[in-house]
Image (cartoon, grey):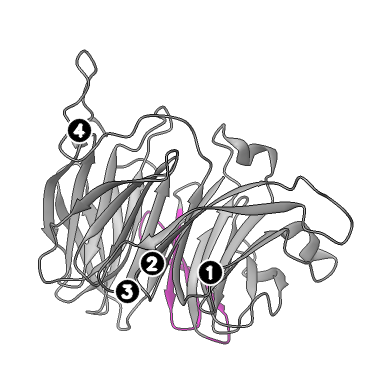
Amino acid sequence: MSLIAGSYEKFIWGYKLKPSNHYSSDQKTLTLTQLFSYPAHLSPITTVAVSGTAAASGGTDDTIHLYDLSTSSSLGAIHHHESSSVTSLAFYTPQNLSVPRNLFSTSADGFVSIFDADPFVLLTSVKVHKKGVNDLAVHHSGKLALTVGRDDCLAMVNLVRGRRSFYHKIGKEASLIKFDGSGEKFFMVTEEKVGIHQAEDAKLLCELDGKKRILCAAPGENGVLFTGGEDRSITAWDTNSGKVAYCIEDAHSARVKGIVVLTKNDGGSTAENPYLVASASSDGVICVWDVRMAIKEKPLPLAEAKTNSRLTCLAGSSTKSFKRPQIGDSAPKGEEKASMEDS
């Protein structure tokens, strides 16, 4: 398993999660081994995304940087967003593929951009919001995405046709939007509240109250949603009942800025450890938790890394060995090149 974190100080941090070689009752059972750390951007990093060994970061310097985690190397940068900060990134990887098909980015000027991931070239860019896009969620089918923006609106993007298909004023600015694992529901975060909506018609099913501002969220298995924020805790919500399932109180000494759920049974190493959740805080600490322990008692992290920087975002996945294409590489001969129309 690998984790990648971005920081306010422009640094990108890469870690690999491995079993500890020296286990005892008072020591951590896992270790976060640093893969790399260097100033990848010219200004603060705002968002990161990972799929397998492919990773990307975006920042207020208007650029997207690409990485190969298997070799801890940089694949170069995409300078598509001119004079506009990159606000969110997401990969789309079909279940039958081991490499991402597309990379999606959003920007502070209201655009959603769609890139082919083999090679990393721009397919189209769509004006979706009148103001900046705060977050994007790609449906597991790869055919549509939901976005929320600073214009207090919710939008849907048809990824097959490359155009906006829905735009609705919600009356307040939402900062985060996520699909659940089934794609039948989506979660929309506004300040300290999380709205659970039916994906088919956006009907509000219930609303969760986090008491303090929520800064990050990640869907887990069986209808569980993990959130973190200004309360410095990691809260697991049962979205079926609308109640708190369990909570790791004071998980960090500062605001929680990123959560990664390492539970998806994708054939990788996470299938062997279906209860691991990673979190990052603005004081530079990354922790990995066994969330089963939170049901009985306050758990101790299984692994911990201190970056001594102000972390802003976190992403991760299981790693698989495959060759990442460089920017501008052509597709291998004899292999069919994926396109949006195939979604």
Question: Which amino acid is tagged 2?
Answer: Phe
Q: Which of the two discs, 2 and 3, labels the residue nearer the N terminus?
A: 2
Q: Between 70 and 334, which is closer to the camera in this rendering? A: 70
- Residue 143 appearing in the image: no
- The quarter of the image holding the C terminus is top left
Q: Look at the image and give the residue range highlighted in magenta.
A: 185-212
Q: Which residue does the image show at 84% across and 69% down from the upper left?
A: 297
Q: Which residue does the image show at 11% across and 71% down from the upper left?
A: 83
Q: CA distance from mark 3 to mark 4?
A: 32 Å
Q: Residues within 10 Å of mark 4 (few under 14, many from 20)?
A: some
Question: Which amino acid is tagged 1?
Answer: Thr
- Mark 1 and mark 2 in contact? Answer it, CB < 8 Å: yes
Q: Between 102 and 309, which is closer to the camera in this rendering? A: 309
Local secondary structure at mark 2:
strand
Q: Which residue is mark 2?
A: 11
Local secondary structure at mark 1:
loop
Q: CA distance from mark 4 to mark 1?
A: 39 Å
Question: Which amino acid is tagged 4?
Answer: Ser
